[in-house]
Amino acid sequence: MASKYDGLARIIIQNVCGKSNVISLTHCVTRLRFKLKDESKANTEVLKNTDGIVTVIQSGGQYQVVIGNHVPDVYAVVNEIGKFGSENEAPADGPKVKMSPGAALIDIISGVFSPTLGVLAATGMIKGLLALFVYFGIISSDGGTYQLLYAVADGFFHYLPIFLGFTAAKKFNVNQFTGMALGAALVYMDDVLALATVEPVSTIFAGSSFATNVYTTFLGIPVMLPASGYASSVIPIILAVFIVSKVEGFWKKIIPDVVKVFLVPMLTLAICTPLTFLVVGPIASFLTSLIGIITAAAFDLSPLIAGVLIGAFWQVLVIFGLHWSVIPIAMANLGSLGYDYVLSPTFAVSFAQTAVVFAVFLKTKDKKTKSLSIPAIISGIFGVTEPAIYGITLPRKRPFLISCIAGAIGGGIIGAAGVKSYIMGGMGVFGITNYINNETKDISSMIWAIIGLTVAMVIAFIATMTTYKDESPKTAVKETGKHQSSADNGTILSPLKGEVKELSELADQAFSSGVLGNGVAILPAEGKLVAPANGEITAFFPTGHAIGMKADFGAEILIHIGKDTVKLEGKYFTKKVEQGDKVIKGQVLLEFDLEAIKAAGYSVLTPVVVTNKEDYVDVVYETGKNVDYGEELITLL
């Protein structure tokens, strides 16, 4: 059954230069995250100007296509049509991309954590609501209802190393069940020792943040476990699975295929399990403690300044996808301390951003801005601010700056108050319960979090209401480079000879619905395509089936020969110009074998659309007639 995102998915796949250019694909809350062989081949401007795509960000070694709240649905269709196979990574012997150490680290973190975030937030929300219900006496923490729901709420985080073992194995291209088995071993040792109430033989670094217990030995070597244990830990399992990827690869090369299915995981686990407990685990625990000491020192030095800085720059990190670098610190704190304070100052930021957009909605007289603001406000309430950032505030600069300043003030209040979150729960309004201490039923952190977000919202709203003005057409032309409807009328000539039809007759929903632009469809009588105006070729797909150009008078035109003709992989198409060429109206851009394409079973009904239709008051055309090359086809007002 066709999805309403089929058209958008095909456009995305085509404009990242097809499956051959895609190494891996995953997604987070709002973005498709591609790793491409060559990002320069992607048609970034075409994607940015496609309805249904908020923007495109190239950061951290990833090509990020920002979709919005419905990204899981779009991801599913893109993955189905593109048949990328793996959710996270190309085969181990597949193409490699050189990245800087920082970009590689962020790529690993996002690849390992992003698949778990939905369920992590969901179970955290359940845990937060349970704490709220117990605090108000709605249910008892001793009752079956509480215990049953708490099992899933706390169980996911307790056994997190098992789930991260799975996602890390996918990221490092190893057997996922080997990764899970190693994660299970880490938690199992914790549980066995806890149930048996085993006393440690000795403690190394006793009384310090690096305290490590020794419970037993392996071949005479002390087996050390951190005082906080490995349950809910993050870094040990990721490093352990990275080691697995090296060991497993070695065994795969030398073990015969007939016994590989069981001997490879057996030998891998036999080596990596003791290696994890004897070397990797202690080192990872040391690093985790060190990171905790450094972040604690920053907050101890000045929790106010730390909160201000985190609140001020959090959205900048989000824009570039660099916020992933902070999440492991927070999760490590939750696992070792039982609470986190590093991410707490960010809680006010999404509310500040939402307040700014609400003020813009009230002040603006521009219908498009109002229509974009409504879904951005709704998303922001639930903590997803990318639609607000990319669609409303960032393009206008001052509103974005106001949101950063308000977020800094709210973050400063939260930081100075020492607000702690006790779960990695929901975002936005669903995140309020993150700050309830489930053990002591203390809600002081929640109260201060609410104070911080309220102050941030009030400041953001008032500042925007007093400073915001709609851009004048002249200013908009200067800042965005787009031509405005009041001064840039123009005529698009017919690029084909044939019969003019309505877009609604196209089988491709992305074109027939008008999502990609306004215009007409032409049933060509000849296999030749000419320039419909003077301008520049902005996109010409290697397969030759689709071409984009920008007319000198400002119109952005997309022409797509037939439906699904990308599958011909350039067969029957002969390009006469290249992307970046300047062309004049009537110049031949493409020749194609019309009859051969039809004989191959493809429709040749061709959309000719104006993709920047919002820049014009009206797009005027006439259907139900025959046109020749160069005849008037579309008039833009």
Image (tube, rainbow, N blue to C red):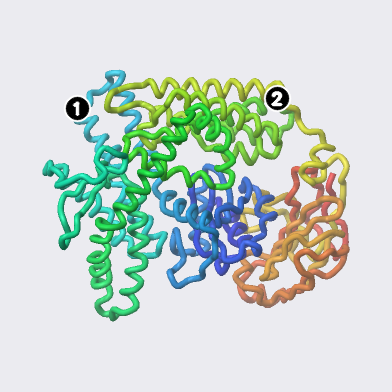
506 horizontally vs 88: left or right: right
Which residue lies at the image location 36% right of the left edge and 42% below the top edge? Answer: 332
Which residue is located at x 27 percent, y 47 percent?
Answer: 230
Q: Position of residue 122 (x, y in %)?
A: 37, 39
Can you tell which quarter of the image residue 156 is in?
A: top left
Q: Which of 388 and 637 is in front in this view?
A: 388
The kind of secondary structure element at disc 2 is: helix
Residue 527 seen anywhere in this rendered image of the structure:
no
Three-letter code, disc 2: Lys
At label 2, counting other C-alpha atoms closer than 10 Å, the crowd grade (few under 14, some 14-19, many 20 or more) is some
Residue 296 found in image quarter = top left
Horizontally, is 41 left or right of 418 in the view? right
Q: Is residue 333 left or right of residue 600?
A: left
Position of 386 relative to 34 (above/below):
above
Tag of residue 363 = 2
From mark 1 to mark 2, how far is it between C-alphas?
A: 51 Å
Disc 1: which residue = 143
Residue 481 image point, x, y percent: 79, 46
Residue that protrudes farthest toward the top in the picture: 136
Examine the rendered structure and indicate whether residue 22 appears above or below residue 473. Answer: below
* Viewer-closest of 218 and 588: 218
Q: In which quarter of the image is the C terminus?
A: top right
Q: Identify the amino acid type marked 1.
A: Gly
460 is higher (above) or lower (below) than 7: above
Is 567 above or below relative to 369?
Answer: below
Earlier-in-chain disc, 1 versus 2: 1
